[in-house]
Amino acid sequence: MFNKITGNIDFIFAIILFCIGLYGLTVKKNLIKKLIGLNIMETSVYLFFIALGDVRLGANIQYWGRTPIVLDTVKARAGIEFMVNPVPTGLILTAIVVSVSITALGLALSVKLYEHYGTLDTSKMKK
Amino acid sequence: MIIFLPVIVPVIISFLIFLCGEKRDKLRYIFLFTASIFDFLAVIFIMPLVLKHDLPPLILLHTTFFDLKFKVDILSLLLAVVVTFLWIVTNSYSIGYMEKNHSLRRYYTALAFCEGAVMGIIFAADLFTLFVFYELLTISVFPLIIHEETEEAAKAGIMYLVYTLSGGAMILFGCFITYALNNGNIEFMPGGMPGLAGQNKIVLYLLFILFTCGFGVKGALVPLHAWLPRAMVAPTPISALLHAVAVVNVGTYGLIRMIYNIFGRDLFLRLHLNTILALVCVITVLGAAFMAFKQRQLKKLLAYSTVNQLGYVVLGASSLNYWALTGGLVHIMYHSIMKISLFYAAGMIIRFKGKIRIPQLSGISKEMPVTMACFVIGVIGIVGLPPMAGWLSKWNLVKGHLLINEPVLASVFLINTVIEVGYFLPPILYAYFGVLDESPGSSEKTSEAPLNMLIPLVIVTVLSFTFGLFGSLPYVLSNKAAAELLMIK
Amino acid sequence: MGSHLQVLIPVTLILGAFLIPILERWFRKLLEPLVIGITFFCLIYSCLLLYGIYLSPLKVFQYFVGFSWNAKTLLITGEPIGIVLQTDLIGGFILVLINFISFLAAIYSLRYVPQNIPDGKKGVYYTLFLLMTAGMSGICLTGDIFNLYVLFEVANLSSYALVSIDGEAEAVEAAIKYLLISALASIFIFFGIGLLYGATGTLNMSYASNQIRKVLLSGHDTFLFSYRYLIFASLALFTAGFGIKSALVPVHGWLPDAHSKAPSPISAMLSGLLIKVTGIFLFIRFYFSVFRIQDGLYGDMFPAFILSIGAISAISGSVFAIAQKNLKRMLAFSTVSQMGYILIGIGFFSRDGLTGAVLHLFNHSVMKSALFLSAGAIFYKTKFTRIDELKGLGFKMPVTCACFTIAALGMVGIPPMSGFFSKWILGIAAIRAGFLPVSIIFLLGSLLNAIYYFRVIGKMYFFNRDSLSVPAPEAGMRELPESIYIPIAILAFAVLFFGLGSDILLKIIRPGVEYLWK
């Protein structure tokens, strides 16, 4: 039981981060805090993805840690049984770009709103 | 393809009329008459084919989910003859009545389109096709009802839409249930749909309620009739054609189809639905008759009289008896002809004398003798006194109900005759024995309406007279239609 | 079998998007012709592609980006690597729809944009417009889940920016609300993709679907953990994410603001396309191609859940719409209710239901675009946005109002408009799937639709023309520029034509649906 928790600590931490981010995004009134919450959520998913490619888990889990893009013959020649899966890392690089653009757009819009209303508090924006 | 032509030609012509624009009157009227006369000739042309059962159904479109299918049987033929003939007459009347009116393009476009929609309903071979044209009719009548563009017309129009669209939704749900019960076949069958016979009774009662309410809205059964008198704000040709002939007859047509081609006679009898429907009809007949008493406006009086008379038709249909059904079917035609003559007469009084309320009619017979004479003949027919056409249908209805041992229902017709005389007397008494009021516009001289309106009136009056005296085409057709519906050889 | 068209369409659009800032700097006159040309060619390409897929024996095109994949490599790796563009008939069909609507919206923008959007932002507008189209087209074409996510974000990001493009505070507020909720949805989806990748080890859709099937059938359960739970969790996350994107009722709050505050061609694109491609189409893609719920491995509760969500949206969306006073807001709420209908069609998980859903998706897209573009035309001419102000407008703007009426009758479901036929098919699908009572939803929804659409039509046409609130147009002045009313007229004609002509669409949709059951 305890082994299960320590073995999956990355995933558990990812889920805790996800919940923190969700809290920030949904409960906080300030637009910047909302955007921070959004970024925390994004980060938690990155963590989740990166952990999927981790080599430590490769031994006892069916698919994780497998590296289909590196052929088995290559691995055998190099004398490696398991290696970090590079696919999630590649995906996350793309996802970070997406996340940065969302954040940038969100911040730009927040600036516009601040110029107009003089506040970032969403509850005060509507008269 | 000959079946589809009466449906599509008016629709195409309505687009042509729309393209004519507001100004080109002559061209528009040529188009209008082309459509209606073409339809009448087409119906006459297919009549012998139908009577010989020589006309195959037409499948216009076939997909996995729906068919667009047309078929003509004798019942459809009966209605088609009435509708197409009266449409020609009404077109002529309309041109006179609507002269120098506004938005004529919209008016005539909708009028021509309605004919196509009505023919579509009448020739439909399955519920889907019927529903498509039924909703088309609902929508295309709407611009006609609100033609006056007054606040009152707008309210009447909205009320009309609420009633008919709800009715349409009920029919659609009925279609779905029928589809589910009859294994995906919603084609009208002689003797009813076989899949319905062994089904759960509650579902069948629900189906009955849905169809009765759905078609009953257009057929103006009593709790659902309220839109009809309100819709009398429309110009009189519309009141005449759509609210005495096309729309309401389509409603009763739907009810007849439901009884004989969806449920079928045996199932209908087994579930005692005929008793329920007869009860509704009795309420319709007597309720409308009493409500007619209260009316002070001539057109509203006629509207309630329509509701009243439609009760006859449905009562005849729900009896499941050959004679009563014949009476009901022939009454569709006779009533249409007589009621349209009453509406024409009322319309002339409204259009040329501006008299809407019944007490205003005082002495009008001196000004418009022909019109009033036709009105009186029409009333005699509606009331059902020999030798007018209405007498023949009423005789058959009474005979049929006596034959199936329903003296109470038979007496409804007799009681109603007395009430009808009661509510039709005031306008006639005012017209013939009232003193002409001394307002400056009126004079003792006769000043009839122009000929293009008077001739249609005289034609329909003469027809109602001839049909009463000689057992003629409509009677033969109704006999055959009744035999076909009841599957009597 | 594959076609270069699959990659050509998004690439053309993206290249066009990047050319536009250059053109704006030096050749301003070429801007609009370029956009219209690109969207037109993409429309032609997508029609050719759909035709090709329709004729191909397997009813699917596969295109391998950046690597060659043959039997030998498959033997070595055991699974496909790299990105596959896999387009089936339904994807191709939606692709044609996307390019059709965006072509019309591009024509419409010709005159609408200079009037309603600050001058300096024209280039940005068209760049984002093409990027959004590219993203949506890519979603329909791709067979790779992560690729799909990226294109999804491209489409979404452009749409956030487009909503706020006129820079007014209300629009910016709507945009940020839209951004925050929508970003939440995309994180859900992203997380769902992570779980799916964890459970199956692949991002290729067809391969993932095989793996999911294997996992569900194998019953590889331990005390605390099973891959099955991972799959269920990712299904739940996808449902939540796409549910937010398609604005189903508990999470519809962002839609009315975003869709009503955006410029009208964009409203038409958002309501007609984006919400469907990033919401409903991905529901279809994931439920039917990836998770394969139609095979019945997920129990009976899931379809019932989807059906009830759909039913709630269908009814309450209409109820909200009745209360609206602003025309575009009313149209936006009507979209919510129609999304509910489509979801009900999906929720049967039957061939007929899916056919009805895809057909209704198409019809609704055409009708709603026509409605939004007409609302935009009214705004263009008169600056009216409220429903009360439309009194008697039917006499002043006959073409626009006639098209609006046709499309509105279609939304209500009056035959022979196309909306009726898709509702009929959905009703029949309900019966064939054994959910007869569900068909009441369609009828009730139609009646509710009738209430608010007829109110608008009534205002337009049926009022005494002496009491018009519209000033009489000057003599010789045309109703609208051609570039504004021609797209509307084409859409209205499509509403009429695809009523009885829905047979043509069914010929494409049916084999596409059959393909998903293989």
Image (cartoon, coloured by chain):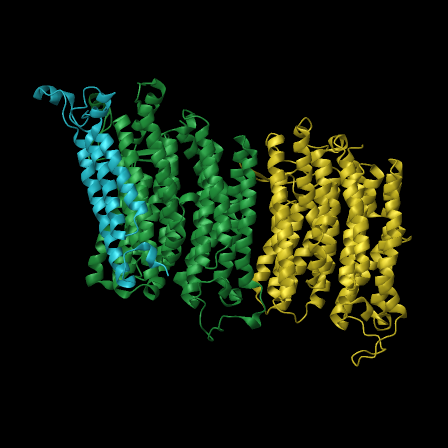
Chain colours: A cyan, B yellow, C green
Which residue is rendered at x = 51% and y = 47% of the image?
C418
Measured as percent of width and height from the top left, residue B39 is found at: 68, 52
Outermost residue on the left side: it is: A78
Q: Is residue C83 visible?
A: no
Q: Is residue B63 above or below residue B438?
A: above
Which residue is rendered at x = 51% and y = 49% of the image?
C319
Quadrant of the drawing holding the C terminus of chain B: top right
Q: Is residue A55 above or below residue C421?
A: above
**In the picture, residue B260 is in which quadrant?**
top right
Instruction: State left or right for residue B102 relative to residue B325.
Output: left
**In the picture, residue C233 is in which quadrant?**
top left
Q: Nearer the viewer, residue C430 or C261?
A: C261
Outermost residue on the front side: it is: A2
Instruction: State left or right for residue C290 relative to residue B224.
Output: left
Instruction: State left or right for residue C218 relative to residue B73.
Output: left
Q: Nearer the viewer, residue C478 or B138?
A: B138
Q: Is residue C367 above or below residue B484?
A: below
Q: Nearer the viewer, residue C282 or C238?
A: C238
Measured as percent of width and height from the top left, residue B242 is found at: 70, 55
Q: Is residue B203 above or below residue C389?
A: above
**In the picture, residue B419 is in which quadrant?**
bottom right
Outermost residue on the bottom side: it is: B440
Measured as percent of width and height from the top left, residue C312 is found at: 48, 41
Q: Nearer the viewer, residue C308 or C76?
A: C308
Which residue is rendered at x = 54% and y = 42% of the image?
C442
Which residue is rendered at x = 28% and y = 43% of the image?
C151
Q: Is residue A1 visible?
A: yes
Measured as percent of width and height from the top left, residue C480 is found at: 43, 66
Instruction: State left or right for residue B392 relative to residue C51.
Output: right
Q: How many marks?
A: 0
Quadrant of the drawing holding the N terminus of chain B: top right
